[in-house]
Image (spheres, rainbow, N blue to C red):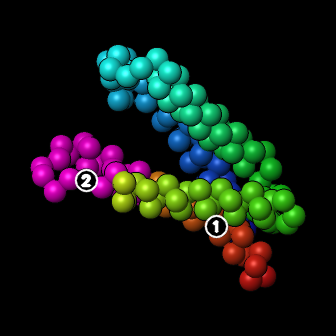
Amino acid sequence: MTIPTTCIIIGGILSLLMAVFHCRFYKIFNWDREFKRISSSNKKVFYSIHIALTFLFFAFGFLSLAYINELSRCTGIAFGITSVYSLFWLWRTLWQIVYFKLPKTRVPQNMRFRHYILIVTFAMLFTSYLIPAVFKLLG
């Protein structure tokens, strides 16, 4: 098994795990309580975006595992797909670091752990989809 192939498999599995994680947001973030404070239209927009992202992660996970060889070779549209998905995860990694920066005050240990696990996971997703494109460009 080649390095790009392994990277696509890892990326596919991580994408599916992100989708499953997103399915748990309602409970993890107490949305039943939190969403009582916002308007119905804002709630609908928020849910719509969240469901779309969850679908996207399931789709990319499935496509990655169903089309491992094509994506790992990075020819044609596969190069564009892996590059764009890689850039999405680069953006999400940086967004986690900058926008969701932990406050300087005392933070609960589970929140700190979750923050750093997300950074590592996003960086792994970025890297797993970047490596096949780099191999294509260099090879």
The one nearer the camera, 16 or 77, is 77
Residue type at mark 2?
Answer: Leu
Position of 135 with respect to 91 (left or right) is right
Describe the element under mark 1 as helix, strand or loop.
helix
Please tell me which residue is depicted at 53% across the width and 28% down the height of the picture. 45
Please tell me which residue is depicted at 66% across the width and 44% down the height of the picture. 61
Toward the right, the furthest residue is 76
Q: Which numbered disc, 1 or 2, marks the residue that appears first in the sequence?
A: 2
Asked if the residues shown at circle 1 and circle 2 are in contact, with their CB atoms under 8 angstroms apart, the answer is: no
Where does residue 37 sit, x and y in percent of width and height? Answer: 32, 20
Residue type at mark 1?
Answer: Leu
Where does residue 30 sit, x and y in percent of width and height? Answer: 33, 24
Where does residue 6 sit, x and y in percent of width and height? Answer: 67, 61
Please tell me which residue is depicted at 33% across the width and 46% down the height of the picture. 114
The one nearer the camera, 100 or 13, is 100
Where does residue 15 sit, x and y in percent of width and height? Answer: 59, 45
Q: Nearer the viewer, mark 1 or mark 2?
A: 2
Position of 102 with respect to 135 (left or right) is left
Toward the bottom, the furthest residue is 138
Is there any visible trace of residue 16 in the rendered image?
A: yes
Span shown in magenta: 100-120
Describe the element under mark 2 as helix, strand or loop.
loop
Which quarter of the image is occupied by the N terminus?
bottom right
Residue named by callout 2: 102
Q: CA distance from mark 1 to mark 2?
A: 27 Å
Residue named by callout 1: 130
User: In the image, is residue 113 part of the stretch drawn in magenta?
Assistant: yes
Callout 1 environment at 10 Å: few (<14), some (14 to 19), or many (20+)?
A: many
Residue 54, placed above or below residue 67: above
The one nearer the camera, 38 or 54, is 38
Toward the left, the furthest residue is 106
Is there any visible trace of residue 23 in the rendered image?
A: no
